[in-house]
Image (cartoon, rainbow, N blue to C red):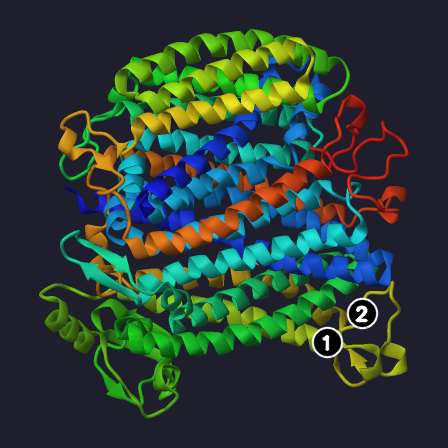
Amino acid sequence: MNLALAPETLARWQFGITTVYHFLFVPLTISLAALTAGLQTAWVRTEKEKYLRATKFWGKLFLINIAMGVVTGIVQEFQFGMNWSDYSRFVGDVFGAPLAFEALIAFFFESTFIGLWIFGWDKLPKRIHLACIWMVSIGTVLSAYFILAANSWMQHPVGYRINKAKGRAELTDFWQVLTQNTALAQAFHTLSACFLTGGAFMVGIAAFHLFRKKHIPVMKTSLRLGLITVVIAGLLTAISGDTLGKVMFKQQPMKMAAAEALWDGQHSAPFSVFAYGDVSKGHNSVELSVPGILSFLADDNFDSYVPGINDTNKAEQQKYGPGDYRPIIPVTFWAFRWMIGFGMASFAIGLAGLWLTRKKFMLPQHLRTGDDEVPHLVLFRNKALSPKLGRLYWLVAIWTMGFPLIANSWGWIFTEMGRQPWVVYGVLQTRHAVSPGVSQAEVLTSLLIFTALYAALAVVEVKLLVKYVKAGPPELTEADLNPPTKIGGDTRDADKPMAFSY
Amino acid sequence: MELHDVWFVLIAVLWTGYFFLEGFDFGVGILTKLLARDRPEKRVLINTIGPVWDGNEVWLLSAGGATFAAFPEWYATLFSGFYLPLLVILLSLIVRGVAFEYRAKRPEENWQRNWETAIFWTSLIPAFLWGVAFGNIVHGVKIDKNFEYVGNIWDLLNPYALLGGLVTLTLFTFHGAVFTALKTVGEIRERARKLATVVGLAAAAVALVFLLWTQVDSGDGKSLVALVVAVAALVAALVANQAGREGWSFALSGITIVAAVAMLFLSLFPDVMPSSLDENWSLNVTNASSSPYTLKIMTWCAGIATPIVLLYQGWTYWVFRKRIGTQHIAETVH
């Protein structure tokens, strides 16, 4: 059979497309839930109207996003059974548990309280309504944790034994699956990246409005919140990425070597910022590389020995039998760089923004701005940036919105492709994981339909986002400012329209 | 009762919860075409389930996830075997969720009408296909000695399973109609009750045939009891509906669904997916289940989480307990 259309290849494309697509919405959902909750908390505590308007504005964008996250998540729950039935049979005893926990503990939480939040503006007292969005936020984080623990088990299986008679892996220590260092590092890294994504989203949209001098008070607050989120989350993403890299170096040496396209092991291994030539053949005509950095990333020591792809391949052949244990090197090499590059770029742009728009007390009198003025962009002590440079910063800030999304996608592509040929590292190979009973035509059909539907929905979603971004924060109504005092709503007028209806 | 038996019951409970809750969701979605006369009425229908449909759908994800964890072989055989019907269900649920959330977000006539059409079809299709799927599970399908489904799509569209599809379709529509009668005010409430009678009678007819067929095929004493309860509750629901006792009618149509699902699972036990080729190749609670350790952990999780879920989901229904009518639907676009 043509390898390009082999069921395994098709199933992998389908998993890749549906999962990367799903993960465009997940980080925005996780971070915007918490950021919206933070803004709503500010409203409840200070009663400043700009916070409520910001809550409504970001809440709307959050809802447009979570709708897509929820529906694309349904596919995730079932496609293991559909396309990966041998995987499911082999690992279900271990892998199924965190998935079921996720549904029973996190999904119910999220999905129930999101309904209460959407429809609850005129049905719930202020503080209870606020608690609902926090519940949603907790649900999203819990859900991420369980699924990342499950994925970490695929990267580094622990807490299990192989039952030869039944031909499957069996769980022996669930706590270990949930708390192994891979899971902790991966959750830390992924969640920070989620907040980097949401922060950059906020910065981009706030910059868009401030650039056009619109909705200034709300957008100024949002810009600040976004910038602070980007800087903190960006820093945490870098730190946790470093931790995860070291964990990976010990647990999956092939992935680390593949990240650098380091063919032969060496001391003081370099990190190439850019390589040209055929990285897949080991003849990198490298443009720019910094010696010792890979060693440092792997082991905290600039001189450490990092085993290369060839060494590791030989070692794995000895351990697991004949075969090729190399992932596709150009993919891992570039994915690793694009992940770091786009992630760090958004962090740097955020850091610059935070400095440029710093608060009044750090600025001379003539550069300070009121609540309803666009902040001056001040690079050095006494002078605002020229209009040209200022314009450039706003434009860059708008574009930054997309950077973490790109970084997230490549991060997943790196870690999943870098684990190949394994689906569960050292335990089960991907080619043994597909559904034997599912035909090529069936996989191809579902691959094409999912891709087409997802593409169409992307267009719909982005157009809707643009519409509501452009519309800006809504004006507040009487009802917004007078939330009910009783659960179920105050019954002054039985025929009053609902504050929100589909 | 061993742990895998407990989990057989728990999976049944999760599916029952799903069909009870999303049953009326699907029904309401179908009624947007059958019952609503204009857009405001459609919106009344959609908004009766607006705050809750998402939480209701999680019962499906839980049933799926729990099957994966507790009966990996069942999960693997079922979803790889019923590939195309499941694909259609998934596509429907994707479009349906987006339709609810996005329909009111633009004022254009085309936009709103298209999403309304989507809500109808994406409610109707899964309502029918779940019945087909469960019909096949209970009836048995071509499973080989490696637990692989070796039939094709046409084998799944057999008369018994198609009848099962009609049962869920009519029953869910009836359930949705009595739910609508319970949750709305005004003229639409009266029409919902009238329609409920018609759909309920149709549901009673197909359900009786299907359940009797199941009883003869694979039933025992216990399943017979469930059958009697299901049919009696359906008849009582019709009577209550006729008498204008909407709360009772909804509770009884709920009991019908619970009893009907219970009957299917009772006639299934101890198999989870019988093979029509060879009895020895059937998946059952023993050969399809996870290890006792996994089942133990899952039991703790489900034992603690499920009652809490019921509490806060119940609270949601209480918060949104008021009936709604066209006067409660604002014109605005959100």
Q: Sort mark 2 into few (<14), some (14-19) or many (20+) by Cα contacts within 10 Å.
A: many
Residue B133 visible in the current orientation: no
Q: Dot 2 corresponds to which residue? A: A375
Question: What is the spatial separation of the Cα atoms under label 1 and label 2, in whole angstroms?
Answer: 9 Å
Above or below, B236 against A404 in this view is above
Specify the amino acid type for callout 1. Answer: Leu
In the displayed structure, does residue A187 sit left or right of residue A57? left
Q: Are the residues flagged by discs 1 and 2 in contact, CB closer than 8 Å?
A: yes
Question: Percent x, y for residue A72?
Answer: 48, 43
In the displayed structure, does residue A188 sit left or right of residue A265? right
Residue at coordinates 65% horizontally, 33% vertically from top-left?
B50
Question: Percent x, y for residue A16?
Answer: 37, 51
In the picture, the disc for residue A486 is: none
Chain letter for mark 1: A
Tell me which numbered mark, 1 or 2, is placed earlier along the sequence.
1
Q: Sort mark 1 into few (<14), some (14-19) or many (20+) by Cα contacts within 10 Å.
A: some
Specify the amino acid type for callout 2. Answer: Pro
Question: Percent x, y for residue A99?
Answer: 41, 52
Question: Percent x, y for residue A84?
Answer: 28, 46
Residue B94 visible in the current orientation: yes
Q: Dot 1 corresponds to which residue? A: A356
Residue at coordinates 49% horizontally, 24% vertically from top-left?
B257
> In the image shown, does A250 or B189 lie closer to the viewer?
B189
